[in-house]
Amino acid sequence: MSRAEPVAALEDRGDAVVFEGAAVRLGGRTIWSDLSLAIPHGEFVAILGPNGAGKSTLIKAVLGLLPLAAGRASIVGRPPGGSNDRIGYLPQRHSFDASTRIRGVDLVRLGLDGARWGIPIPGLPSRAREAARVAEVIELVGATAYARKAIGELSGGEQQRLLIAQALVRKPALLLLDEPLDSLDLPNQAAVAALVRRICREENVAVLLVAHDINPILSYLDRVVYIAGGAAVEGTPEEVISSETLSRLYGVPIEVLRASDGRLVVVGQPEAPFVHGDRHAHAHA
């Protein structure tokens, strides 16, 4: 995919994420190639595509956990892996077991000092300042009322809000969320998406969110990156989730329909591809 403005100019402008002609290979197989995109600060972007297409691989490439086989990247102004202290990361996970007794507020605090050992080191921010920051992000995600309860007692949506608070507590420039909506019901998916959109604007944080189903988050997104068949397309949801674009990506005729309730339905021929996860409605042509 391509953009009119050269990537070098976008880097100079200070975008949170820039890839230029990037490729990743695993076990001798190219996962995706010729990936070029630029994500400004304060923008909410979803990464979409079928299982195994390389959505989580893109997150790992941003973190520097997988080297690029071709091209280059700039993450918050540095090569991948060089700015991880400025990245908030929420990996793919399932709900906490009901027996998990750690309190929500302590889970959030782990985002600040979970890697520390022993007694406090002189020169580190005071515990009072840390407590104030923890309280600030808990309020930001709307979790103050239940933050002192055991995490195992909370609903999936409440747990996810506290995990997002944990990822935000160090004031990151970039937030990476790997399928944070996967275990939530539809109302909670929309609520978390609305929360993430607000965080983008208020904190000026760029967000990359891996998702299977675009429908609950469609109205909150600035852009999407759609990965399929070893290639990727980036643009607004209207530009990317279209019959023409998806047909080109998959190499087979694809039709995108809009239902009466506004939801998108992807129809494939001769068989609809796995596009947005098991919650997405598919039909056979």
Image: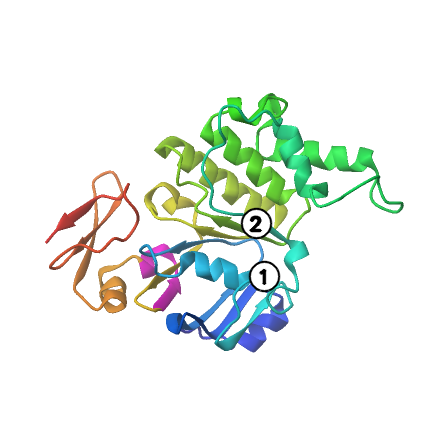
Task: Assign a secondary structure to mark 2.
Answer: strand
Residue 126: image location, x then y, percent? 84, 38
Gap in angstroms between the C-alphas marked 2 and 1: 14 Å
| 50 sits to left or right of 123 | left
Task: Assign a secondary structure to mark 1.
Answer: loop
* Residue located farthest toward the right when viewing the structure as drawn: 122
Q: Is residue 233 magenta?
A: yes
The quarter in which the N terminus is drawn is: bottom left
Which residue shows up at 57% across the image and 60% down it? Answer: 63
Which residue shows up at 40% across the image and 34% down it? Answer: 184
Whether residue 39 is visible to the viewer of this picture, yes or no, is no
Q: According to the image, label 2 marks what residue?
A: 89
Q: Is 14 or 60 nearer to us in this picture?
A: 60
**What residue type is disc 2 on?**
Tyr
Q: How is the protein colored in the picture?
A: rainbow
Tell me where residue 55 sits by quadrant.
bottom left
Tell me where residue 118 sits by quadrant.
top right
Residue 160: image location, x then y, percent? 51, 35
Question: Magenta region: which residues?
Answer: 231-240
Residue 138, disc? none
Q: Is 140 or 177 nearer to us in this picture?
A: 177
